């Protein structure tokens, strides 16, 4: 049984078609890396799956554990187990991090018909997760992402993921802007959350992250579609040779699709 | 004037003829004079700059009788309707403008004299003469001040003796009974904070029922040298109420005052707040939130006048408008000639939560002194879509996400209130009035 089944997905942003027939299948416990040149539609994929406004699906389907994901509101997608770790997490002054996370967890639990956690039980859970993520509890007392460094923001995303325990986590260029130490910390957090029933879509521009989060599958997203799939050796080949060689086997791709240059 | 008086003015004139004389010659003369001024000018109209965004055409067609004092004295009011956490000390309560001894607790604080105005006038009228016999400018812009001066027979006389530090906040409550439709009530508030004293006052507006009533309050605060006064205004009247409040805070040398205002009630509300920094090194801070929905109209007119050297002021106001409501904010800073070293800042940010709501904000700066620091800014915007999506992507439903962000937007204005229990209560009250309903947690 597939956890995620994306079939022939087409999506537009501001009237421009970005995804042009993307298909992908993910089974429980698998880690799929999505790589590709700039402008290939990597971030669009994450945003479409999470339900961001302004991303218009024009064709295709997405089934998540058999449910039509595209028919759900963003909050309901989250409650059914989809989590997007943002490339650029938003700062929200005036909303306390802990309050926000408890509100989120309890909203999800309510949606699933589970009882809500009181503040004692919630704090106990948070403390356990903090230990795993090696995050100082000082971050909890601040407003959501306000004044966080780039590394702190990304770690906070993974920490939220640890608390919310999604079935499918989409990491949208989580490595961007991180130095090697921060990258390792984030990767360790992700690895601690790997389990046989949790899947990951790791969207990245660089092979480097995959040294620390070892993928089961690597896909190349170019021109709005998955054009090549393989194991982790594909990532190494891309690191060495770039994307240009794909033109030999995929003559329909334009040069711009493979270099990330504006069309 | 040549026009026939409006029903509003005619009703006021009728009502005045029934008012008993006070027996104090200067006071009766002042009342007659104010009534005359009101009758001559009538209510302000659209071309009146100070009332440009608050049309009174509908109000002028309504007639308000004077609220019946005997009824106001007898109507049952649940004290729980105005109970506030963190505010459990002396309390003075007015129902439809009538002092209610049974609901009030005036005594027991050293150095604090709290009395109803009518009683104070009976005992010693002369010390009140300066405040009650002073004249407002003639003209429609001050129509409600004239009206209040002509009709207010009761109110608050509060004196805090020099050097006294009052630990607990003093509570002034205005209740619209709701039992007397189409009536008006008027209350006068006189507060003097003695040299070097410290005190906090909570002035609260509530309604016990839904009837159409008009209430006016004119409040004067004098903050003597080196005194520190905190004022919390909490306005949660019913959405059938018309309220006009004029507050004037005069600060002497080294004195400071902080006003926190939360307005969530009323159908038509006008709040004029003027601070006069009269002595060197005086400081005035104001923080406020108005949250409107339905067809509410709330007009806040803040004016801070720097009249002395090295004075400071900081104003931070937030407005939220939903439904078909309309918010108006005018924030003016005036730095007089010679008030060198003044430091003034004013910020008003607003959120429009519906396409049919409207907010008009108008910052004004008038500076006649040198070496002045002044900053002001005003914005009107919507909730940030990126933040909304971020919260929703974590599982928080849209309505709750909107409520969370709206509360966060207002938080800056209320978080500086030192009384923690009261601050939390104001936060809860605001959440309860946010258009998208209460948030979990």
Image (tube, coloured by chain):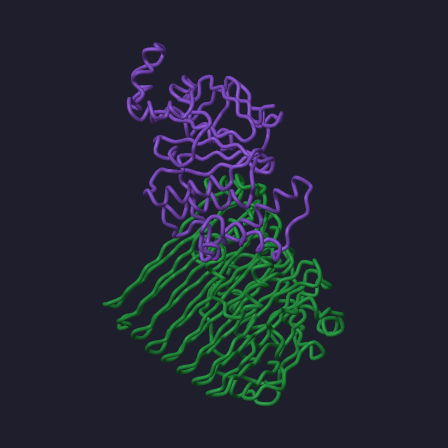
How many numbered marks appear? Answer: 0
Chain rendered purple = A
Percent across and percent down for residue B410 are 49, 55
Percent across and percent down for residue A67 are 62, 27
Up-down: is B195 above or below B394? below
Chain rendered green = B
Query: Which quadrant holds residue B250?
Result: bottom left
Percent across and percent down for residue B432 are 62, 54
Residue B39 visible to an observer of this rendering: no
| Front residue of this view, candidates A73 and B430 | A73
| Front residue of this view, candidates B78 and B408 | B408
Query: Which quadrant holds residue B73?
Result: bottom right
Q: Which residue is drawn at 68% across and 60% down?
A: B182
Percent across and percent down for residue B166 are 53, 82
Residue B105 visible to an observer of this rendering: yes
Q: Residue at x 37, y 38 (%)?
A: A175
């Amino acid at each position: 049984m597939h956890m995620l089944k994306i079939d022939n997905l087409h999506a537009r942003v501001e009237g421009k078609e970005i995804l042009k027939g993307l298909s992908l299948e993910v089974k429980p416990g698998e880690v799929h890396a999505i790589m590709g040149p700039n402008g290939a539609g990597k971030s669009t994929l994450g945003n479409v799956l999470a339900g961001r406004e302004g991303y218009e699906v024009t064709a295709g389907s997405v089934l998540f554990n058999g449910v039509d994901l595209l028919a759900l509101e963003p909050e309901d997608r989250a409650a059914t187990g989809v989590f997007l770790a943002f490339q650029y997490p938003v700062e929200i002054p005036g909303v306390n991090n802990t309050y926000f996370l408890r509100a989120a967890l309890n909203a999800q639990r309510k949606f699933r018909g589970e009882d809500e956690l009181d503040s004692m039980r919630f704090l106990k859970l948070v403390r356990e997760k903090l230990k795993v993520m090696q995050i100082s509890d000082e971050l909890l007392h601040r407003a959501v992402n306000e004044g966080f460094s780039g590394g702190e923001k990304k770690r906070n995303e993974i920490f939220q993921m640890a608390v919310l325990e999604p079935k499918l986590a989409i990491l949208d260029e989580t490595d961007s802007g991180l130095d090697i130490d921060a990258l390792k910390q984030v990767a360790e957090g992700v690895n601690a959350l790997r389990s046989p029933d949790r899947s990951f879509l790791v969207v990245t521009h660089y092979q480097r992250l995959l040294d620390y989060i070892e993928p089961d599958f690597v896909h190349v997203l170019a021109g709005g579609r998955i054009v090549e799939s393989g194991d982790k050796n594909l990532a190494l080949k891309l690191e060495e040779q770039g994307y240009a060689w794909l033109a030999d086997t995929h003559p329909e791709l334009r040069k711009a699709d493979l270099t990330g240059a504006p069309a | 004037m040549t026009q026939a008086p409006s029903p509003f003015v005619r009703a006021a004139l009728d009502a005045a003829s029934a008012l008993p004389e006070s027996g104090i010659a200067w006071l009766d003369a002042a009342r007659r004079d104010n009534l005359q001024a009101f009758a001559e000018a009538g209510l302000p109209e659209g071309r009146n700059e100070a009332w440009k965004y608050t049309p009174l055409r509908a109000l002028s067609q309504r007639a308000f009788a004077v609220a019946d004092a005997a009824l106001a004295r007898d109507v049952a009011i649940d004290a729980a309707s105005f109970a506030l956490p963190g505010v459990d000390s002396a309390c003075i309560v007015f129902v439809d403008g009538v002092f209610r001894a049974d609901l009030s607790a005036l005594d027991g604080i050293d150095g604090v004299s709290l009395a109803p105005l009518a009683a104070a006038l009976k005992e010693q009228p002369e010390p009140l003469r300066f405040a009650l016999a002073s004249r407002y400018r003639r003209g429609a812009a001050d129509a409600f001040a004239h009206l209040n001066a002509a009709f207010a027979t009761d109110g608050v006389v509060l004196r805090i003796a020099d050097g006294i530090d009052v630990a607990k906040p003093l509570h002034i409550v205005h209740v619209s009974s709701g039992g007397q439709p189409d009536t008006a009530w008027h209350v006068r508030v006189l507060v003097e904070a003695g040299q070097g004293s410290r005190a906090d006052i909570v002035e609260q507006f509530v309604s016990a029922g839904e009837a159409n009533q008009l209430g006016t309050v004119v409040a004067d605060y004098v903050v003597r040298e080196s005194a520190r006064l905190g004022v919390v205004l909490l306005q949660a009247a019913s959405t059938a109420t018309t309220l006009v409040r004029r507050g004037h805070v005069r600060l002497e040398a080294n004195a400071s005052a902080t006003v926190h205002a939360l307005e969530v009630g009323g159908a038509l509300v006008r709040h004029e707040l003027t601070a006069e920094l009269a002595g060197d090194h005086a400081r005035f801070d104001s923080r406020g939130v108005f949250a409107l929905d339905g067809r509410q109209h709330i007009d806040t007119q803040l004016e801070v006048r720097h009249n002395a050297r090295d004075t400071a002021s900081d104003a931070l106001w937030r407005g939220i408008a939903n439904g078909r409501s309309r918010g108006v904010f005018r924030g003016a800073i005036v730095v007089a000639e010679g008030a060198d070293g003044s430091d003034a800042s004013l910020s008003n940010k607003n959120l429009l939560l519906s396409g049919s709501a409207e907010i008009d904000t108008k910052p004004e700066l008038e500076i006649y002194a040198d070496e002045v620091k002044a900053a002001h800014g005003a914005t009107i915007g919507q909730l940030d879509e990126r933040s909304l999506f971020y919260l929703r992507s974590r599982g928080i439903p849209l309505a709750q996400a909107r409520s969370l962000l709206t509360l966060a937007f207002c938080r800056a204005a209320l978080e500086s209130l030192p009384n923690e229990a009261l601050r939390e209560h104001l936060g809860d009250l605001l959440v309860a009035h946010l258009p998208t309903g209460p948030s979990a947690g």
